[in-house]
Amino acid sequence: MTDLSIGRHVAEDPAAPERPATTDINPTAVVGAEILIEQLHKFYADVTVLEDLDLHIQPGEFLAIVGRSGCGKSTLLRLIADLEQPSYGEIKFKSARHIREGITSDDIRVMFQDPRLLPWRSIEQNVQLGLAKEHQGNASALLEKVGLKEKAGLWPSQLSGGQRQRTALARALSHKPRILLLDEPLGALDALTRLDMQSLIEKLWHEQGFTAILVTHDVSEAVQLADRIILLDKGHIAKQFKVDLPRPRKKDYAFSELEQQVLNAVLAT
């Protein structure tokens, strides 16, 4: 076993179960990590944010987390990212098949609503951050994938909000993570740019097979992207929804029906 944090995040190597049948990705291409969360608690002074939470996320799964503000969504993401430590409980990572063993900090990347680009570095230099010198050439290929190859030499201030988020996505994927954590990354974008970014994230997830966890207030976005949706309420998982819809998803009757079910559940909390 490889301890990834202060006794709370534990990486293990047994063979992981099959991917959920709700996705199209060939299981042999999956590089995502399996995540097992057991009896997770998080307290801040006398405030309980997460309480006795158990969750199993399969390798390569796309999970969305919804719920009202303050329900613990972003806290859960920060705990998985090892940006904070649990008050009690464990978060375990298991290697998927056909990949190297063990999980390192480079295997987990986070994309926030604020792209957090360094203003004194070019777009390409931002994507290269943290990469070994021999791998920095990968930045150009990633910028091409996100449609920014011609913008590589520009400064972040010269890009639109959507372009800055595309840069942040390329930077997150430059390390070839097994787990990509998305904390409301599209919340500040206009509607059309948001739809474009949803399609791009889904395309890259499909190609690379990482495990994705999306925190969002947008129920439609959750249904559009996820294999499964969990609803958090007062630090607990109140409900789970399997998104058994073919990809690419069309906003037809089945989509709208599930969207309304999830929305009604959120409003009932």
Image (cartoon, grey):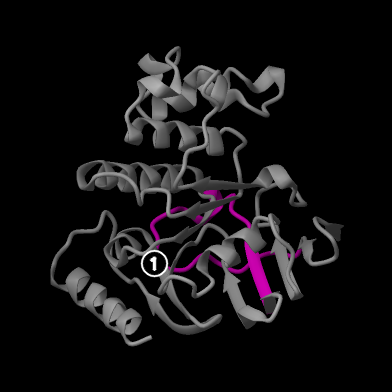
Instruction: Inspect the image, locate mark 1, and give the three-letter code of the amino acid beneath it.
Output: Thr
Whole-percent x and y of residue 251?
17, 62
Relative height, residue 133 to residue 80 (above, below): above
Q: Is residue 109 above or below residue 40?
A: above
Type of secondary structure dominating the magenta stretch: loop
Extreme residue toward the front, this view: 45
Q: Residue furthest top?
A: 153
Q: In this image, 218 relative to 228: left or right?
A: left
Q: Is residue 111 magenta?
A: no
Q: How many marks?
A: 1
- Residue in the picture at 36% in, 30% down: 163
Position of residue 66 relative to residue 265, above or below, is: above
The spot of residue 103 in percent (x, y) is: 74, 51
Q: Is the N terminus in the top left, top right, bottom left or bottom right quadrant? A: bottom right
**Rendered position, 83 above or below 235:** above
Q: Quadrant of residue 17?
A: bottom right
Instruction: Give how far across and how far down residue 205 sits, in percent.
Output: 45, 47
Examine the structure image and report whether residue 18 is included in the region drawn in magenta: yes
Q: Which residues are magenta?
A: 14-39
What residue appears at the point 46 percent right and 43 percent down from the top-left corner? 114
> What residue does disc 1 label?
22
Report the residue at 24% width, 58% height from top. Answer: 249
In the picture, measured across the screen, residue 217 lies left or right of residue 190, that is: right
Q: Which residue is found at the position 30% from the left and 44% from the top?
A: 189
Q: Nearer the viewer, residue 208 or 71?
A: 71
In the figure, is residue 174 to the left or right of 45? Answer: left
Quarter that holds the C terminus = bottom left
Query: How many C-alpha atoms fall within 10 Å of the one at disc 1: few (<14), some, or many (≥20)?
Result: some
Disc 1, SS: loop
Q: Give the image location of residue 252, x and y in percent.
A: 14, 66
